[in-house]
Image: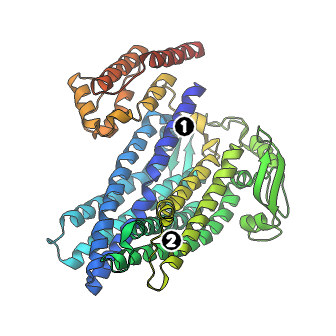
Amino acid sequence: MDLEALDIARWQFAITTVYHFLFVPITIGLSALVAGYQTAWLRTGNEQWLRMTKFLGKLFLINFALGVVTGIVQEFQFGMNWSDYSRFVGDVFGAPLAVEGLLAFFLESTFLGLWIFGWDRLPRGLHASCMWLVHLGTLFSAYFILAANSFMQNPVGYDYNDETGRAELTDFVAVLTNKVQLVTFPHVILAAYMTAGAFVAGVALWPLVRGKGREGSEDRSMYRSGARVGAWVLLVAGLGVVVSGDVQGKVMTEVQPMKMAAAEALYETEEPAAFSIFTIGTPDGTSEKFSVTIPNLLSFLATGELDGRVEGINPLREQYIETYGQDPGATYYTAGDYTPYIPLTYWSFRFMMGLGFAGMAGGLAVLWATRRGRAPTDARWTWVAVGLPLMPLFANSFGWIFTEIGRQPWVVFGLMTTEQGVSPGTTTGEVLTSLVVLNLPKALAGREMELVQSCRAQNFGIWPPLSEPVQIRIGILNLLSREAITDIVTRFADAIRALGGEVDDARVTEALEGVYDRAVAAE
């Protein structure tokens, strides 16, 4: 296997996933808040709630659309870049994803359409129910997707078939009730409510600061109320995130002790174990040089006991090599270090917690600034309006980075390494090309359709059934040979230049030739 192709494939999936998940928590949480505002309007007749419903509803639709488009790119990568993984666990992994598509996404999209076009056409109560059903669909969608991910963290409900070399589903209920799934789902959903609350608080705070917070302003009470509602949702959900995160940490320690050890940069087993606030290790990540700690806290977080035993990185490394270093018949085990990248695991865990607590502090500040009829008008609050939605949002992203990086080198813990999951027939040039064309030059922003039409007229590299942005990103992947890749890159460059974009032919050619030379040398 070409290791460079593996690295690029991992980068591509990571970039796409992080981009996709920027919209997911807002979509989940905001659907509930929109439904809540519409219900409040029905019960009170207050037109301000109706205005907030329609305003936030538009923002929800934008996030929903972007989430769908970015999610489609992920689906294609399972077959293109990660075909061995898909073949090995497709019977298990595909089941919850199929249910998510057939049940959850269908529920979301159907009732969202009714909500969009049902204003003044459906009875008010029925129309509001449509958004509640959309929210229910987002919860179902999250549950089934998280069930698939939880299998990767703690595989259950399967048997390994020696003849086919595949993991086969034996107990779908076990997959849906995985102990990791049962603690991950409430944690993720509460984090989504937290993010949506911060989003609404920031959006409502902005017009207050920019002029509508003055005494006598017609919209002062509406935006002030929106800021307070968002801040309360942020705080209450944040407390739920803290509690659910504590439970999740104990389950994580049970099923993936290496992840907890990496999260704390704990190299040797300790009993009791201190929580690391700040740690500096050696460049290779094998030992600790300096740290600031809180005694006994890690033992409590990991085991529920102040004097609990927490396994360290070094003994776990030796244990994993002994356990997984021998091929038991499947070809998916790779002897190796079995240690995640410690610096990224350690700091992503702290950024997750730090940004989450910072967001809660921002929520308290908003409640204080809007107490007893007050509304912030100082320009300094502009930074709060902008920063508040970003803190829980980025905390979500760092949380998922920690979750996935901390599982490495496994793509399915204890069953299959990430290296073994990449597509065997995919070359470095193919993956690199798909990564390079992931984004268009700034000069062509918003002109995807025009570029697609131009390329389609020349009859190359474009898949008609897909939306234009998705076509741009994946249309190039259906050409596999060196000559074809060079040709498609050249023609894409010509098409981009024809629309006014800039392409450095020399750099592109140099990069491609370097990739081809390395691929030939590897063969």
The crowd level at tag 1 (other Cα within 10 Å; few <14, some 14-19, many 20+) is some
Q: Position of residue 170 (x, y in %)?
A: 50, 54
Which of the numbered marks, if any, corresponds to residue 101?
none
Q: Residue at x 44, y 49 (%)?
A: 20
Q: Is residue 476 left or right of residue 235?
A: left
Which of the numbered marks, if any, corresponds to residue 10?
1
Image: 213 above or below 152: below
Q: Earlier in the sequence, mark 2 or mark 1?
A: 1
Q: Secondary structure at mark 2?
A: helix
Q: Position of residue 482 (x, y in %)?
A: 43, 15
Q: Secondary structure at mark 1?
A: helix
- Residue beneath label 2, please? 234
Image: 214 above or below 455: below
Q: Residue at x 55, y 69 (%)?
A: 362
Image: 170 above or below 333: below
Q: Position of residue 269 (x, y in %)?
A: 84, 55
Q: Is residue 85 left or right of residue 207?
A: right
Residue situated in front as seen by the camera: 469 or 134: 469
Q: CA distance from mark 2 to mark 1?
A: 33 Å
Q: Residue at x 47, y 34 (%)?
A: 81
- Answer with the quarter of the image where residue 26 lies: bottom left
Foreground mark, 2 or 1, reads 2
Q: Amino acid at mark 1?
A: Arg
Residue situated in front as seen by the camera: 220 or 28: 220
